[in-house]
Protein backbone atom coordinates (compact mmCIF):
# COMPACT_ATOMS: atom_id res chain seq x y z
CA UNK A 1 0.00 0.00 0.00
CA UNK A 2 1.28 3.44 -0.90
CA UNK A 3 0.69 6.55 1.12
CA UNK A 4 1.33 10.28 1.31
CA UNK A 5 2.39 10.39 4.96
CA UNK A 6 5.92 11.61 4.22
CA UNK A 7 4.70 14.36 1.88
CA UNK A 8 2.01 15.49 4.32
CA UNK A 9 4.47 15.45 7.22
CA UNK A 10 7.00 17.54 5.30
CA UNK A 11 4.27 19.94 4.13
CA UNK A 12 3.51 20.59 7.83
CA UNK A 13 7.21 21.15 8.54
CA UNK A 14 7.45 18.19 10.91
CA UNK A 15 10.22 15.66 11.28
CA UNK A 16 9.45 11.99 11.97
CA UNK A 17 10.05 12.38 15.70
CA UNK A 18 7.57 15.26 15.98
CA UNK A 19 4.91 13.37 14.05
CA UNK A 20 5.48 10.21 16.07
CA UNK A 21 4.96 12.14 19.33
CA UNK A 22 1.78 13.75 17.99
CA UNK A 23 0.42 10.34 16.97
CA UNK A 24 1.75 8.54 20.07
CA UNK A 25 3.74 5.96 18.09
CA UNK A 26 7.46 5.37 17.66
CA UNK A 27 9.59 7.20 15.11
CA UNK A 28 10.38 3.78 13.64
CA UNK A 29 6.66 3.23 13.01
CA UNK A 30 6.45 6.50 11.08
CA UNK A 31 9.54 5.57 9.08
CA UNK A 32 8.15 2.12 8.26
CA UNK A 33 4.79 3.57 7.17
CA UNK A 34 6.47 6.20 4.97
CA UNK A 35 8.67 3.56 3.35
CA UNK A 36 5.77 1.20 2.70
CA UNK A 37 7.20 -1.46 5.02
CA UNK A 38 4.28 -1.31 7.45
CA UNK A 39 0.58 -0.77 6.90
CA UNK A 40 -0.95 0.94 9.92
CA UNK A 41 -3.86 -0.55 11.81
CA UNK A 42 -7.26 0.91 11.03
CA UNK A 43 -7.15 2.82 14.34
CA UNK A 44 -3.78 4.35 13.48
CA UNK A 45 -4.91 5.13 9.91
CA UNK A 46 -7.88 7.05 11.37
CA UNK A 47 -5.57 8.86 13.79
CA UNK A 48 -3.28 9.86 10.91
CA UNK A 49 -6.21 11.00 8.76
CA UNK A 50 -7.64 13.05 11.65
CA UNK A 51 -4.23 14.63 12.28
CA UNK A 52 -3.90 15.76 8.67
CA UNK A 53 -7.60 16.58 8.25
CA UNK A 54 -8.01 14.22 5.30
CA UNK A 55 -9.94 11.05 4.54
CA UNK A 56 -8.05 7.77 4.88
CA UNK A 57 -8.39 7.12 1.15
CA UNK A 58 -6.74 10.48 0.41
CA UNK A 59 -3.64 9.35 2.33
CA UNK A 60 -3.48 5.59 1.73
CA UNK A 61 -4.04 3.89 -1.61
CA UNK A 62 -3.25 0.48 -3.13
CA UNK A 63 -0.16 -0.29 -5.18
CA UNK A 64 -0.84 -0.28 -8.89
CA UNK A 65 1.61 -2.42 -10.78
CA UNK A 66 4.13 -2.28 -7.95
CA UNK A 67 4.98 1.37 -8.62
CA UNK A 68 4.87 4.03 -5.97
CA UNK A 69 2.06 6.39 -6.95
CA UNK A 70 2.43 10.06 -6.19
CA UNK A 71 -0.90 11.78 -5.73
CA UNK A 72 -1.49 15.53 -5.50
Image: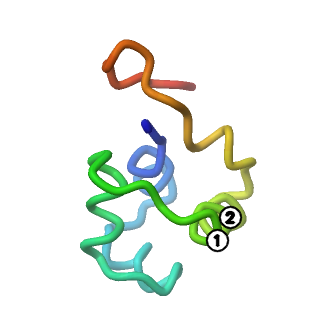
- Determine the residue located farthest toward the top in the rendered image: 65
SS type, badge 1? helix
Placement of the C terminus among the 4 image quadrants: top right
Residue identified by numbered label 1: 43
C-alpha distance separating marks 1 and 2: 5 Å
Q: Residue at x 73, y 57 (%)?
A: 53
Residue identified by numbered label 2: 46
Is 6 displayed left or right of 51 in the figure?
Answer: left
Q: Are marks 1 and 2 in contact (CB under 8 Å)?
A: yes
Is 31 displayed left or right of 20 in the figure?
Answer: left
Percent coordinates x, y for residue 57 in the rendering: 68, 40
Report crowding for label 1: few under 14, some 14 to 19, many 20 or more residues within 10 A (C-alpha).
few
Q: Nearer the viewer, residue 14 or 31?
A: 31
**Which image quarter: residue 27?**
bottom left
Is 49 displayed left or right of 6 in the figure?
Answer: right
Q: Residue at x 43, y 44 (%)?
A: 7
SS type, badge 2? helix
Q: Residue at x 32, y 69 (%)?
A: 16
Percent coordinates x, y for residue 19 in the rendering: 44, 73
Q: Nearer the viewer, residue 19 or 14?
A: 19
Percent coordinates x, y for residue 9 in the rendering: 45, 57
Q: Residue at x 47, y 41 (%)?
A: 3
Q: Which mark is residue 7?
A: none
**Which image quarter: residue 67?**
top left
Q: Nearer the viewer, residue 50 or 62?
A: 62
Amino acid sequence: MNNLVEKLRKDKGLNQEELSKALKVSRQTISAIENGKYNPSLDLAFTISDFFGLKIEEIFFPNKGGKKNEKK
